Image: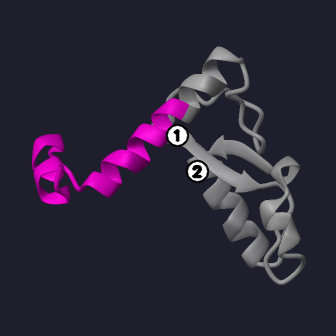
Amino acid sequence: MSNKKASQQLGMDQGTAQHRLRKQFLFDLLYRHHENFCFRCEKEIENYEELSIEHKIDWLDDDPALFWEITNVTVSHWLCNINAGKTSRSGRV
């Protein structure tokens, strides 16, 4: 199937659809295993649209190996992740 045909039938770019499907699949697994809780605020992540994947310890300008360290990867609310990034960039932790 061509990308154009798939995009037409899905009603969106095929890459966007694949990203959404992966996120829905991951959220479903987390939910079924009761692991859909935010690393930052510790509250429940209630749907896939809130879900964000992030690193517990920032690897950039520190240790690129931390990027690949699976124990350094967690989930959070998208907004909690964004707000944490703004805080760390401003010099506050």
The earlier-in-sequence mark between 2 and 1 is: 1
Q: Position of residue 28 (x, y in %)?
A: 55, 24
- Check disc 1 and give the amino acid type: Glu
Magenta span dominant secondary structure: helix
**Residue visible at 89% across and 76% down?**
63
Label 2 sits on residue: 79
Q: CA distance from mark 2 to mark 1?
A: 8 Å
Q: Residue at x 58, y 50 (%)?
A: 79
Image vertical order of residue 58 relative to residue 51, above or below: below
Helix, strand or loop at mark 1: helix
* Front: mark 2 or 1: 1
Q: Are marks 2 and 1 in contact (CB under 8 Å)?
A: yes
Is-magenta flag for residue 9? yes
Q: Which residues are magenta?
A: 1-25
Answer with left or right where residue 11 lies relative to residue 48: left
In the figure, residue 66 lies in which quadrant? bottom right
User: Which one is in front, 16 or 44?
Assistant: 16
- Say which quarter of the image contains residue 44: top right
- Residue occupying image coordinates x 50% and y 31%: 25
Residue 55 percent across, percent down from the top left = 77, 57
Q: Quick check: 54 left or right of 3?
A: right
> Residue at label 1?
50
Q: Residues within 10 Å of mark 2 (few under 14, many from 20)?
A: few
Q: Which residue occupies the foreground of this view, 42 or 24?
A: 24
- Number of marks present in the image shown: 2
Q: Position of residue 86 (x, y in %)?
A: 67, 69
Q: Quadrant of the C terminus?
A: bottom right
Q: Is residue 15 magenta?
A: yes
